[in-house]
Image (cartoon, grey):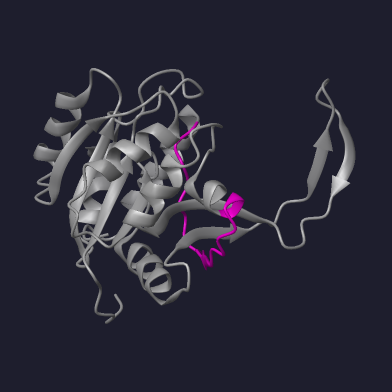
Amino acid sequence: MGSTSFSECAAIIVGGGSGSRFGGDKLAVPIAGRPVLSWTLLAFEQTQSISSIVLVAPVGREEEFRAIAHDAGISKLTAVVTGGSYRKESVERGLQALSQSVDLVAIHDAARPLVTPSLITCCLEVAQASEAGASAAAVPVSDTLHLGDQEGCAVKTVDRTGLWAMQTPQVFRAAPLLKLLAENPHGKPTDEVSVALAAGWRIPFVENREPNLKITWPADLMVAEALLRSRKPSL
């Protein structure tokens, strides 16, 4: 980990989705001996610069998620809040649950259990040093891209030069981000960088060369489990 001296940092773990593409619940599914959500929480628990964690849960599953965190030995959990209809609402509720003393907040998808303390710390370091007070984990697009038509056929090759696939954590100054989200009540952004870019913010990428997949399809569980079992117990 880095040696940067941070202002107070927190994490918001966003797990308020329905899991519709997965076909049901995915965060409580066990992989490598623990629920998916446990692995995600443990990475932030083990990140020295993170002082508190807010967990966003689907409606009606707040106590279940709290129990998963308890069973995983998560000591930094300060709140479990109910997610909204869309990601933006869920993140806003998470931000509102933070202590006012928090400066930087790392927002992370609960369904990305392969995140590591080193990546989290790097994102915090880049955000703290950036003019916008923000950063985002991402990876340059390496696949050939084609635009498809409504029938699912390729119609045009897309130049991948300069294209990045976004991941999380995405780090921001907590107060400015909450203000920005509140001032943009419409739309359904799929991440916080989208909202910040629309407002003219300049967000530096943190290039991540390690696996950080988001559990989206059932087959992703097998990949994530194999990768987790290949790591040392301490992540």
- Magenta-drawn stretch contains 134: no
Find the magenta span and give its range. 197-216
> Residue, x 53% and y 47% (percent of image)?
195
Residue 217 lies, in percent from the top left, at: 50, 29
Q: Of helix, strand and loop, which mostly describes the magenta segment?
A: loop
Considering the image in quadrants, where does the N terminus appear? bottom left
Q: Residue furthest right?
A: 155
> Residue, x 77% and y 62% (percent of image)?
161
> Residue, x 40% and y 52% (percent of image)?
177
Considering the image in quadrants, where does the C terminus appear? bottom left
- On the question of residue 18 being in view, the answer is yes
Displayed quadrant of residue 63? top left
Q: Residue furthest bottom?
A: 3
Q: 33 or 23: nearer the eye?
A: 23
Residue 44 lies, in percent from the top left, at: 25, 55
- Magenta-drawn stretch contains 206: yes
- On the question of residue 230 being in view, the answer is no
Residue 41 lies, in percent from the top left, at: 24, 47
Q: Residue furthest front?
A: 183
Q: Is residue 7 left or right of residue 157?
A: left
Residue 64 lies, in percent from the top left, at: 17, 25
User: With respect to residue 166, does 24 lie above or below?
Assistant: above
User: With respect to residue 178, does 185 lie above or below?
Assistant: above
User: With respect to residue 145, does 36 lie above or below?
Assistant: above
Q: 178 or 121: nearer the eye?
A: 178
Q: Is residue 145 left or right of residue 177?
A: right
Report how many numbered discs are placed on residues in the image: 0
> Residue, x 9% and y 50% (percent of image)?
75
